[in-house]
């Protein structure tokens, strides 16, 4: 039974990855017009149209004259070898661009995810006890409002206040290579704050509901009547059993952080994966856009897979099932 469940979960992720790669392959080929326009960009396509020999050479070189099933197999083979294609807007291999830009996105998403989980869990545990008090109602409403605000709008609002009005932070961009760590902290302060506020609100809402639901149980009343404080009860009898669910929430948070970072990077001109994808769209660099989308999707899937493995290791109920 355990082997079957493990195989079922593993198969689910394999199917998911295969589906993403398939959609990524078919998208430019299902668009109206010649797929070479969407794969190579307008400038290269225009030059190829004016030169039939160049057009045939490009079609043959990149396998576009082959049947679709053979093109798909070549596409998968290139991916497994780490060949993500060539960016015409940057004039470089896409793998080099991703190796350069992905760490910048992780510098923003990893700290914001960790902070949002800690802050959101602590705030949610607090709000779940006696949630009908006026201060906690106001705080809960504030969490809902913050999570309802688009990240790019919140980013522009903080830029207006802290960068333009107060002049406390840089207006955008990244420090030059070799800059001291303090410069990176100054540039990353507002982007990390935006993602932390947005994701902390979501975690607080989830943890508040979980705490409120359990606080009505009879064993909670018994534990509190014996002198156990709410803090000790939350950490010993509420947070620990909820750890597998909390890990799943962490994986979801990583997905939210990446999706939110795409827009936040544009607002702050932070040259990570989100800003790179936006540039790829504006410059019609479809190979770069496809590769960036694939990498972000694979990172989110990997985060969910790691959460499943940790849940299996930490939750005895899963191991015994």
Image (cartoon, rainbow, N blue to C red):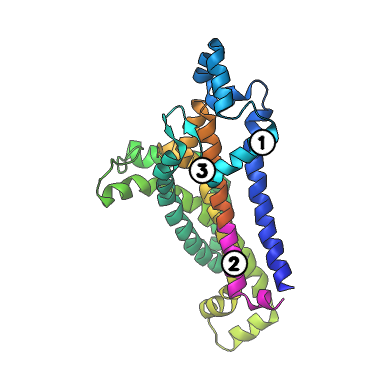
Of mark 2 and mark 1, the one earlier in the sequence is 1
Element carrying mark 1: helix
Residue 237, percent from left and from top: 59, 79
Residue 63 appears in which quarter of the rendering?
A: top right
Of the residues tagged 2 and 3, which is closer to the observer? Answer: 2
On residue 70, the disc is 1
Is 283 situated above or below 106? above
**Residue depicted at x 56% and y 56%:** 302
Of mark 3 and mark 1, the one earlier in the sequence is 1
Q: Is residue 157 visible?
A: no
Q: How far apart are marks 2 and 3 (CA)?
A: 30 Å
Characterize the local packing of mark 3: few (<14), some (14-19) or many (20 or more) Cα atoms within 10 angstroms: many
**Dot 3 corresponds to which residue?**
151
Does 320 appear in magenta? yes
Q: Distance between the residues labelled 3 and 1?
A: 41 Å
Of mark 2 and mark 3, the one earlier in the sequence is 3
Query: How many marks can you see?
Result: 3
Quadrant where the N terminus sits is bottom right
Horizontal placement of 215 versus 139: left or right?
A: right
**Residue depicted at x 65% and y 33%:** 27
């Amino acid at each position: 039974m355990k082997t079957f469940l493990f195989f079922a979960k593993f198969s689910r992720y394999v199917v998911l990855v295969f589906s993403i790669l398939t959609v990524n392959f078919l998208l430019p080929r299902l668009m109206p017009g010649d797929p070479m326009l969407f794969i190579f960009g307008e400038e290269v396509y225009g030059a190829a149209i004016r030169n039939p020999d160049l057009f045939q050479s490009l079609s043959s070189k990149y396998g576009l004259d082959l049947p679709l099933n053979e093109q798909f197999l070549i596409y998968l083979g290139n991916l497994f070898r780490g060949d993500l294609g060539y960016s015409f807007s940057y004039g470089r291999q896409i793998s080099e661009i991703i190796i350069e830009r992905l760490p910048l996105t992780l510098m923003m998403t990893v700290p914001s995810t960790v902070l949002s989980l800690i802050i959101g869990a602590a705030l949610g545990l607090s709000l779940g006890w006696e949630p009908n008090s006026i201060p906690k109602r106001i705080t809960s409403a504030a969490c809902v409002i913050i999570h309802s605000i688009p990240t790019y709008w919140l980013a522009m609002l903080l830029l207006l206040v802290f960068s333009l009005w107060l002049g406390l932070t840089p207006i955008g961009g990244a420090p030059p290579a070799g800059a001291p760590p303090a410069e990176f902290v100054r540039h990353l302060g507002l982007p990390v704050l935006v993602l932390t506020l947005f994701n902390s609100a979501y975690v607080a809402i989830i943890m508040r509901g979980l705490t409120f639901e359990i606080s009505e149980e009879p064993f909670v009343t018994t534990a509190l009547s014996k002198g156990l404080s709410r803090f000790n009860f939350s950490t010993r009898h509420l947070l620990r059993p909820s750890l597998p669910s909390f890990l799943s929430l962490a994986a979801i948070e990583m997905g939210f952080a990446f999706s939110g970072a795409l827009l936040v990077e544009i607002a702050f001109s932070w040259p990570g994966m989100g800003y790179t994808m936006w540039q790829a769209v504006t410059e019609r660099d479809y190979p770069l856009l496809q590769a960036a989308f694939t990498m972000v999707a694979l990172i989110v899937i990997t985060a969910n897979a790691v959460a499943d493995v940790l849940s299996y290791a930490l939750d005895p109920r899963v191991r015994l099932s």
